[in-house]
Amino acid sequence: MKNLIFLCSAVALLCLASCRKHQAPSPPIQRNVWKKLSEDDGANLHLDGVSFVIGNKIYYGLGYKAISFTPNIYTADYNNDFRIFNTSSKTWSAGPTIPAGMAPRANASCIVSNGKAYIGGGTINDAGWWEYDPSLTGDAAWKQIPPHPSYTGGNHVAVTTGKAAYAGAPSSYLYQLDATGNWIKTNVTLIYSSFAGSCFILGDSLYVIGGHYIPFNGIPRTVSIGFKYNLSNGQSYLGVGNFPYPIFGQPTFNLNRKQYILYNGSTFLFDPITEKWTDLSIQTPVFKGAGIPYGVDALNVTSYTYNAAVINGAAYAWTPSGQISRFVP
């Protein structure tokens, strides 16, 4: 009997070794190229929507289902929900719906602090901000926090680092969100009258690159100019980090302590020493034809409202229709 048990065990080990030997290896991760992970989500478009990342999940929602222009008439159909993309399973699923007391909006701003998302401003021209807690469900996940002292409209400065979250409006102070959901005034004054600039923080410096500039005559134009603000002493610098092209609403992300902006199908890298941008699709051939996905809005115009974030050492870019690509350096 003992010999029989030993023989069976040996056969089992032989089969296991054979299975392992012939098991197909996992495909290697493609590096230094944008790789599409997901086609369109199949749900509603979220044009000019808002995005945030908590854990390994991408939340994308609100914005417009559809938008149309006719002479002197502007029509918008708003979303009141979010979709969630799980970067582990690479699938979309239904996310939270905003409560009845929170107005749906587009072009809103969002910051993340202590595992919670904070959404404010937007097309409703409201200074009110809302907190979303993913550990709760239903309306209980949402809570209105004190209004921002100067923040109305949307797409002003809103930026998150590992240490703090900030938001501010042009010609006013920059405010930091504290752990209790209150706004604390900093010594930085945002002197540039623009919105939808690409914002990021490196060290003690806040950069606001490009955006829609509104001059005194009221006719907005897209610009390439960069502004730098020292978060410690409040000093501001004009013309630092200028982008090669006028940009408006372009996503930016920090990966391995390097700052990137996505623009017109290209990936641009920021040099913190020279404070200049390099187009990697020209410098590095592997970036050519990278195929960063774009969305198409109701006017059949390529949408600028794609987004980007970093999760577990990889960058993700996604469109209003739910196409997602990943970049691993």
Image (cartoon, helix red, strand yellow):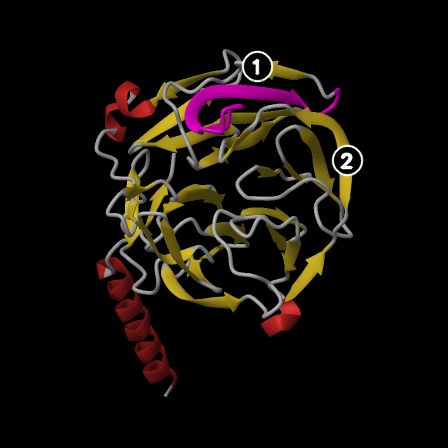
Query: Quick one: 322 or 167, which is closer to the camera?
Result: 167
Query: Quick one: 297 or 325, which is closer to the camera?
Result: 297
Quadrant in the rendering for residue 148: top right
Give SS at disc 1: strand
Q: Is residue 273 above or below residue 193?
A: above
Query: At 76% from the left edge and 31% from the top edge, which residue is drawn?
Result: 186
The answer, for residue 137, to whether it is visible in the render is no
Quadrant in the rendering for residue 287: top left
Q: Is residue 239 above or below residue 66?
A: above
Among all residues in the image, which is located at the extreme top? 274
Q: CA distance from mark 2 to mark 1?
A: 22 Å
- Give whichever of discs 2 and 1 has the lower sequence position: 2
Residue neighbourhood size for the residue with mark 2, other residues' Cα within 10 Å, grouped as few (<14), some (14–19), many (≥20) = some
Quadrant in the rendering for residue 292: top left
The disc placed on residue 238 is 1
Query: Quick one: 254 or 328, which is closer to the camera?
Result: 254
Magenta-colored span: 211-233
Among all residues in the image, which is located at the extreme bottom? 1
Q: Quadrant of the N terminus?
A: bottom left
Picture coordinates of residue 109 (x, y %)? Answer: 55, 46
Query: Is 176 on the left or on the right of 278, as rendered?
Result: right
Q: Report the residue marked by disc 2.
A: 185
Picture coordinates of residue 158 (x, y %)? Answer: 59, 39
Picture coordinates of residue 125 (x, y %)? Answer: 58, 48
The answer, for residue 105, to whether it is visible in the render is yes
Give SS at disc 2: strand
Amino acid beneath label 2: Lys
